[in-house]
Image: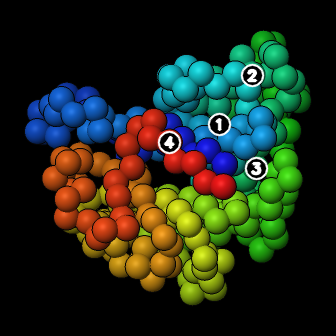
Amino acid sequence: MLITFLGTGTSQGIPVIGSTHPVCLSDDHRDKRLRSSVLLSWSKANYVIDCGPDFRQQMLQVGCDHIDGILFTHEHADHTAGIDDIRPYFFRQGDIPIYALPRVIDNLNIRFDYIMSAENKYPGSPSVKLHTVDPKTNFTLKGKTVVPVLGLHNRIEVLGYRIDDFAYLTDIKSISETEILKLTGLDVLVLNALRVEPHHSHLNLEEAIELSQRIGAKKTYFTHISHMLGFHAEVEKKLPKNVHLAFDFLSISLP
């Protein structure tokens, strides 16, 4: 399985519009972050986790000519606002499967009713095939088992996903011991790490390191990073040896 980070930034991305923060002015390409998303590819299948406002740019960058579905973590705009840009895929492939919690599907039905509603569908808009995810029930995508992993983003539930020995969790602040048990024996864990200072709905760097050590994956990559975490090159040097900062369009290959 090939894992490609399409974006590793927080909701504002980096650089932040109008910001003169030193990280926003950095020349290091690793400090320029689109909104968080990841592309998973195996046996000619392509699945995207989250579809944010940078989706079109991300798909063009990686040259992705088809997608087999989108797995949503939660409904916030930086994870869903690119759904209209699935149109080229829809025109070639037909309805695009999406997978999400019932609450997230309800939210998409309201915000994107011109796509989601059979009665209000606008001519030329894409269509989707809805799949409701039960956090307690595994499901299958193109021969691989997907294990939903439930976390809390302040007060709302968010989904992470485990496929084989890879797991992707973003926008979490806390996770139960029961859900952590789903993450034993990982080769690669992806986890959010927003900034150094504590945050009400995201793990900060210290919390992310602590959780990564509890889970014990062979390697952990941090994503959903804000400019307030600091320069990529400087932060990377201070991390435990098996923990790294992800960056946009980094690819990792797993058996």
Residue found at x 44% / y 41%: 250
Mark drawn on residue 168: none
Name the image quarter holding residue 209: bottom left
Q: Which residue is mark 4?
A: 251
Q: Is residue 75 above or below residue 63?
A: below
Q: Amino acid at mark 1?
A: Arg
Question: In the rendered view, would you say 126 is above or below 52?
Answer: above
Sort mark 2 into few (<14), some (14-19) or many (20+) by Cα contacts within 10 Å. Answer: some
The colour mode here is: rainbow
Q: Which mark's residue is nearer the viewer, 1 or 4? A: 4
- Whichever of labels 1 and 4 marks the residue nearer the N terminus, that label is 1
Which residue in the structure is indicated by mark 3? 99
Q: How packed is label 1: few (under 14 Cα within 10 Å), some, or many (20 or more)? A: few
| 164 relative to 121 in the view: left or right | left
Closer to us: 3 or 128: 3
Q: Are marks 1 and 4 in contact (CB under 8 Å)?
A: no
The number of callouts visible is 4
Counting residues from the start of the chain, the first of labels 3 and 2 encountered is 2
How far apart in space, not on screen, are marks 4 and 2 (Cα)? Answer: 22 Å
* Residue matched to label 2: 89
Which element type, helix, strand or loop, lies under badge 1? helix
Amino acid type indicated by mark 4:
Ser
Nearer to us: label 3 or label 4: 4
Q: CA distance from mark 3 to mark 2?
A: 17 Å
Secondary structure state at the residue bearing disc 2: helix
Secondary structure, mark 3, is strand
Q: Quadrant of residue 19?
A: top left
Q: How far apart are labels 3 and 4 at the CA level?
A: 23 Å
Label 4 element class: strand
